[in-house]
Image: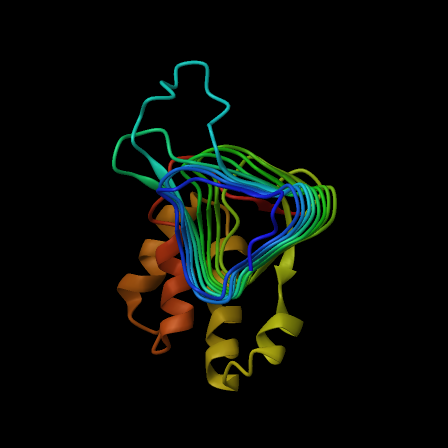
Amino acid sequence: MIHPSAQVHPSARLAPDVEVGPFAIVEAGATLGPGCRIAAHAIVKARTELGAGVRVDHFAVVGGDPQDLSFDPATDSGTHVGDRTVIREHVTIHRATKAGERTLIGTDGLLMAGSHVAHDCVVGDDVILANGCMLGGHVSVGDKAFISGGVAVHQFCRIGGGALVSGNAVITEDVPPNALAHGRNLISGLNLIGLRRRAVPAPAVAEIKKAYHAVYATRGACATLAQTALNEGGYQTMEARAFLEFFLGGKRGRFVSPE
């Protein structure tokens, strides 16, 4: 159902059961999948694609132009939001900066009120961004990560899957998978509660702990220590190997450090 006061561009593609509330706007070329609900005063910008069951709450703006002074608004870029993701009040998500590219939000996510996802970000599945969380451009967030309220993440940073970043943290370096980060680029161990809630097998948890100590309990470059641990071949679980392999990539050059 489309409210009479809503503005839906003729070229937008809406599934038959989509709901668009009062004074909401759906711009040209937007695609809204089955079961989407667009609340009053929300805006779905041009070239935005919403999967099935996506909810966009009041005053949220999905697919807006990047906050990049060099960006050409005529660029044919877009935004994709995966199935069943909930976008709460005043959330802003910006489209990619290059033609043919998209800012990507995964499935079953929750973007709480006032959170921001900048251009070219890639956010995985089952991710929670709490109120006022800010992701800079080109940030990647792994599946099942939880970024708490007021967190600021610098552009090009990576937040590993299953990581938990505490409230009001400042992150300018990469956060490894399943780590607990807080303060300014500090790490205080592993997100063991999260691992338990996700029913990660005990052997995998044990190996993740071993991998964590291999990287952080010895002085030296994280990437070198992680590569050495992988070369020794003592890790059988994909979770532990993924933890170590994380240190071999990225653009920020360093990783959050233990207290």
Q: How many marks?
A: 0
Q: Residue furthest front?
A: 4
Q: Whole-percent x and y of residue 14?
A: 42, 55
As displayed, is residue 125 above or below residue 247? below
229 on left or right of 91: left
Q: Residue at x 66, y 52 (%)?
A: 88
Q: Quadrant of residue 90?
A: top right
Q: Nearer the viewer, residue 188 or 106?
A: 106
Q: Is residue 131 visible?
A: yes
Q: Quadrant of residue 96?
A: top left
Q: Whole-percent x and y of residue 36?
A: 52, 61
Q: Whole-percent x and y of residue 255?
A: 50, 43
Q: Whole-percent x and y of residue 117?
A: 54, 40
Q: Residue at x 37, y 40 (%)?
A: 47
Q: Nearer the viewer, residue 160 or 148?
A: 148
How is the model colour-coded?
Answer: rainbow
Q: Is residue 253 visible?
A: no
243 on left or right of 87: left
As displayed, is residue 91 above or below residue 125? above
Q: Residue furthest top?
A: 69
198 on left or right of 96: right
Instruction: State which quarter of the image contains the N terminus.
Output: bottom right
Q: Residue at x 39, y 59 (%)?
A: 244
Q: Nearer the viewer, residue 169 or 91?
A: 91
Q: Nearer the viewer, residue 246 or 120?
A: 120
Q: Residue at x 38, y 64 (%)?
A: 242
